[in-house]
Amino acid sequence: MRNIKGDRVLWVVVVILSIFSLLAVYSSTGTLAYKKQGGNTEYYLFKHFVILAFGFFLMWLTHKVKYTYFSRISQLAMIVSLFLLALTLAFGSHINEASRSLTVPVINLTFQSSDFAKLALIMYTARMLSKKQDQIKDFKSAFLPIMWPIIAICALILPENFSTAAMLFATCLVLMFIGRVNMKYILSLIGTGLVTLVILTSIIYFTKPDKGRILTWKNRIENFVNGEKGGEDGYQVEQSKIAIATGGVFGKMPGKSTQRNFLPHPYSDFIFAIIIEEYGLFGGILLVLLYLIILFRGTRIVVKSPGNFGAFLAIGVSFSLVFQAMINMAVAVNLFPVTGQPMPFVSMGGTSIWFTSIAIGVILSVSRELENNPEKQAENGAVPA
């Protein structure tokens, strides 16, 4: 335990989430195991355990790095992100008619470049905000240098993964607001984003594509707005609502889900529905509280942080993780169109869990520095924990 530093509450939350993840993935991959692994239901449990274990190693490794180093790392990470996203658009593997991932040669590992780009952009935005605090209200010297990287990364993600681009854009706007960027510039950026969204929606709605990503977006929008049950997305939402309704208050107990046999992706996009079906309303509330604790602990770090970069880094990363979790839950209960966003650290998936682990490691790195330098907290008027 002496080698584990940082926010102890955050460590406990991550352990509880990983237990939820193991139980839910093991329960929801039964049908998949019979289809692809000859009925070996332990295959995905073991695979997921290894992924989680490596995620914990990455988290531990990241939390040992002094958080100020992430400022320099973000510069290189941004360059790599732009290259990887462009490469993914040109040569990426197609998942649901979208080029979302790259396949690493030799080891045949599928790599989600947008997961890397999200973390890189948040770190870089935190760096720029901290460096530009003296002239933060100025348009040319502060707003433009902060804004252009955000637009570049989101524009590269947008064609194949609209939801990720929108979530990342919103997270950066929140960071800019916390970083005291002039409100009229933020509002103008929001207005530009809304106009772009309206134009894209109009193009999607009035065009008649036979296939491709535009057709997928159009079907999702129409199904959500009209409440239609047709198509794969409508079918998934209906099965998800059945799982939630039959779960009741106390659930069917672990491993007793029936909707896992009908939901196409019960171990990733709709894992929240399986958790409620098996653990009931209490299980769902506990999961929501765990993510809110992550946001709360991130906010406490902001209050206590001795420097601007650490504060922006902690709140940006924690908000991003919790925002993605809430979007996943909103899709499961039909409050939001189907997006394909996994639940951080719970849904099955290698790169998603690993980059989530690194992101939590970044938050722990900031909190570890606060533990090592309590005198800096006092200098900044921080309230002791």
Image: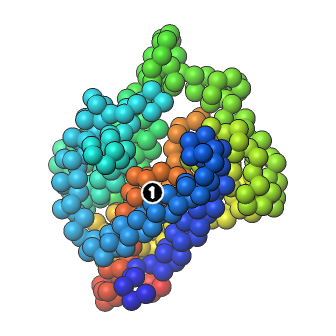
Above or below residue 252? Residue 114 is: above
Going by the image, does 328 lie left or right of 82?
right
Q: Residue 153: horizontal and vertical position, in percent? A: 29, 41
Q: Is residue 323 visible?
A: no
Viewer-proximal residue, 379 or 62? 62
Viewer-proximal residue, 48 or 179? 48
Dot 1 amino acid type: Ile
Q: Residue 11: horizontal and vertical position, in percent? A: 48, 75
How many numbered tags mark residues here?
Answer: 1
Would you name the residue on which mark 1 appears?
A: 353
Residue 135's quadrant in the figure? bottom left
Q: Residue at x 67, y 29 (%)?
A: 234
Q: Residue at x 61, y 22 (%)?
A: 222
**Colouring convention used in this rendered image of the protein:** rainbow
Residue 139's quadrant in the figure? top left
Q: Which quadrant is the N terminus positioned in?
A: bottom left
Going by the image, does 186 lie left or right of 211?
left
Crowding at dot 1, Cα within 10 Å, few <14 / some 14-19 / many 20+, comes out as many
Q: Residue 47: horizontal and vertical position, in percent? A: 49, 57
Viewer-proximal residue, 247 or 149? 247
Q: Residue 204: horizontal and vertical position, in percent? A: 48, 18
Outermost residue, front direction? 38
Above or below residue 18? Residue 198 is: above
Q: Is residue 127 visible?
A: yes
Q: Residue at x 43, y 41 (%)?
A: 164
Q: Residue at x 51, y 25 (%)?
A: 217
Going by the image, does 79 lie left or right of 35?
left
